[in-house]
Image (cartoon, rainbow, N blue to C red):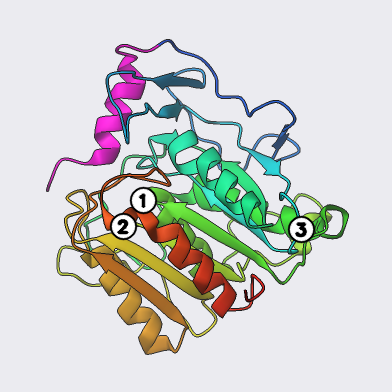
Amino acid sequence: MRPSWFALFAVVAISGLHAQPQVWQPSPGHTQIPLWPGTPPDAQPVPGPEYATSDPKSLIAGKPMIAESNVSQPTMTIYAPEGKNTGAAVIVFPGGGFQILAMDLEGTEACDWLTSKGITCVLLKYRVPSTPYNWRCNCRPDDFSLSVPALEDAQRALKLVRFHAAERRIDPHKIGVLGFSAGGYLVTEASTNFRRRLYTPVDAADRESSRPDFALAIYPGHLATDKDALNPNVPVSRETPATFLLQAEDDDTDGVNQSLVYYAALKHAGVPVEMHLYAKGGHAFGMRSTANPITHWPELASTWLQTIGILPAR
């Protein structure tokens, strides 16, 4: 198996080389909201307190990345749309291999883009790390050994946003998810497991649906087995929401087959799907501008959101 980009960032985050430990905080004017009223369900031990690091010698598009580790108390931070409110909302899942969370590269920077489009952005800080697990095994369909806590957090966030939609001027039928890398995989889990009850309801919000109305998975991982079959933990059906997929063919972390197998499953189930593959781009570029044409993907995503009726047509 190729060395994982996620593992490399986890090493940077855990070692703290060239970095000063801190705890990630949203910018002024934005407040983190606890996801659970008490101890989260299926709480797992973490090796230490939560902390974030940023290595100035490890740059992406000329800037370092904030890596958040040991998240055991998940939160969501709401970013209000700029200008006209379209009524749409997107919950963002940063990537990081379920070991760290890339809070700016694949989090706040995505919120900046979404709010500029009139979309409410909800940045989810979900639980990491999770139990060690070999993704390329012959998994049982009911085996969620790695991402149970993360998926519970994703489901809870969707229910909370839908429950409080009216007070935040959100259309409860226009709530989507956007994720990068491992967060892209979490997008596919949330899109296909919304009928699976993973935790005991804790309040009235849990009576809401956890099904996203649309989904964007950007350079997702963990979707293809070694035999290029779809990971059985992602049971695509005709109820899976419309999906946007993006990946580079030179993505050497998981490979372009991650998107290909998911695209094929969606098409087979009759789910509306749009996929964009580029020759170059690698992995973990987020929203940042590079010399590769793939860097313009947000424009394609904006057009797709218009096509499916989430954003108004120009």
Is any atom of residue 103 visible in this view? no
State the image coordinates of residue 185 (x, y, percent, origin top left). Answer: 40, 57
State the image coordinates of residue 205 (x, y, percent, origin top left). Answer: 79, 56
Location of residue 178 with respect to 96 vertically, above or below: below
The front one of 121 and 192 is 121
Mark 2 lies on a secondary structure that is helix
In the image, the segment drawn in magenta is 1-19
Q: Of callouts 2 and 3, which one flags the residue occurring earlier in the amino acid sequence?
A: 3
Q: Amino acid at mark 3?
A: Lys
Outermost residue to the right: 167
Is residue 119 rendered to the left or right of residue 50?
Answer: right
Q: Amino acid at mark 1?
A: Ser
Location of residue 196 with respect to 89 vertically, above or below: below
Instruction: Compute the Cα span from label 1 to label 2.
Output: 15 Å
Q: Of callouts 3 and 1, which one flags the residue occurring earlier in the amino acid sequence?
A: 3
Q: Are marks 2 and 3 in contact (CB under 8 Å)?
A: no
User: From the image, which quarter does the C terminus lie in?
Assistant: bottom right
Q: Which residue is mark 2?
A: 294
Q: Residues within 10 Å of mark 2 (few under 14, many from 20)?
A: many
Is any atom of residue 118 visible in this view? yes
Q: Residues within 10 Å of mark 3 (few under 14, many from 20)?
A: few
Q: Which residue is mark 3?
A: 84
Q: Are marks 3 and 1 in contact (CB under 8 Å)?
A: no
State the image coordinates of residue 257 (x, y, percent, origin top left). Answer: 22, 66
* Residue 181 numbered mark, or none: 1
Q: Of callouts 1 and 2, which one flags the residue occurring earlier in the amino acid sequence?
A: 1
State the image coordinates of residue 106 (x, y, percent, origin top left). Answer: 45, 43
Mark 1 lies on a secondary structure that is loop
Residue at the (21%, 53%) spot, across then down: 251
